[in-house]
Amino acid sequence: MSHGPCEACEELLQGYLDRELTDAEVELAESHLDGCDYCRRRYRFEVSLRQYVQTTAVERMPAGLMDRLSELRSAGA
Amino acid sequence: MVGEAEPEIDGRRIAAEARDRVRFEEEALALADQVYRVARRLVATREEAEDLVQDTYGRAFRSWQSYTPGTNLRAWLLRILTNLNLDRGRKIQRTPDMQPIEEGDYYLANKMAEAQGEQVLDQERVVEHLSQDSIVNALSSLPHDFRDTVVLVDIGEFSYADAAQILDIPIGTVMSRLHRGRRLLKQQLAEEAIS
């Protein structure tokens, strides 16, 4: 089975991507992905985009900020 | 008897409170890098992110007793941070028009294929054509409400339930903002990719 864009699949795949589905929904999503080429390609794209966003948009804390935060601690710390 | 026992109990209580406080501060500081990563993508500049994180820790250290030990400290800190960020006064933004789902769906992939004159483009390879700047710019171009949700879930890796609690909105709203926010992000990336 294969089809074009559909709101119900969008919703299901978002939950699947974010690991927010119940066991029953996971089963539904996986069996749909197994049979639907369109959603499978779309899901793979979403996974790779999300990973890319995670790796490229992350900036580490600048040096010095930790010291300034530590100074905010209560006296005697 | 009572008069002698009380100072001792008080002393123990004060010592226990001091220990709890030190533990709280250490646990909170251990999360600073993770808190900063989220803050950095919620605001436009590094300086703003540093100010926001400092204000957050200042407030957290003052109101540490309102934190319930054993609950999600990172979410608790981020809730302070997003509230402070809101307090800074945001401009009302117009929500950009959405593409209909037929286009929105493969919008980014299609636009990039178009730009490169390729007929078929492997979905997984699309992202290889995106630069770090384009991701950062696209995230900062999202309207605040959408950006907050996308950043908390995609950068902060919070669950829908945590994001809902942090932003004080229903889970259903987290899901719809996330869905819309990610689609806007893809549209923005597509526009940057072809410009």
Image: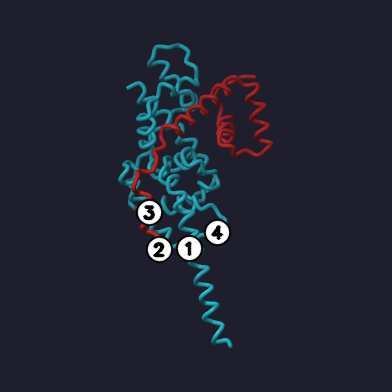
Chain colours: A red, B cyan
* In this view, B73 is above or below B134: below
* In this view, B6 is above or below B101: below
The quarter of the picture where residue A17 lies is top right
Q: Return the x and y of residue A56 as percentages of the image width and height.
A: 41, 32
What is the secondary structure assignment of the residue under circle 2?
A: loop
Q: What amino acid type should be assigned to the residue bearing mark 3?
A: Leu
Disc 4 residue crowd, few under 14, some 14–19, many 20+, Cα 10 Å:
few
Going from N to C along the chain, the mark reached first, 4 or 1, is: 1
For disc 1, the chain is: B
Q: Are marks 4 and 1 on the same chain?
A: yes
- In the rendered image, the quadrant that contains the N terminus of chain B is bottom right
What is the secondary structure assignment of the residue under circle 1?
A: helix
Disc 3 residue crowd, few under 14, some 14–19, many 20+, Cα 10 Å:
many
For disc 2, the chain is: A
For disc 3, the chain is: A
Q: What amino acid type should be assigned to the residue bearing mark 4?
A: Pro
Instruction: Give the CA distance from mark 3 to mark 4.
Output: 21 Å
Which residue is labeled 3 in the image? A69
Which residue is labeled 2 in the image? A74
Q: Return the x and y of residue B150 as percentages of the image width and height.
A: 46, 39
Contact flag, marks 1 and 2 (Cβ < 8 Å): yes
The quarter of the picture where residue A40 lies is top right
Q: Nearer the viewer, residue B29 or A29?
A: B29
Instruction: Give the CA distance from mark 2 to mark 3.
Output: 11 Å
Q: Are marks 4 and 2 on the same chain?
A: no
Q: Are marks 2 and 3 on the same chain?
A: yes
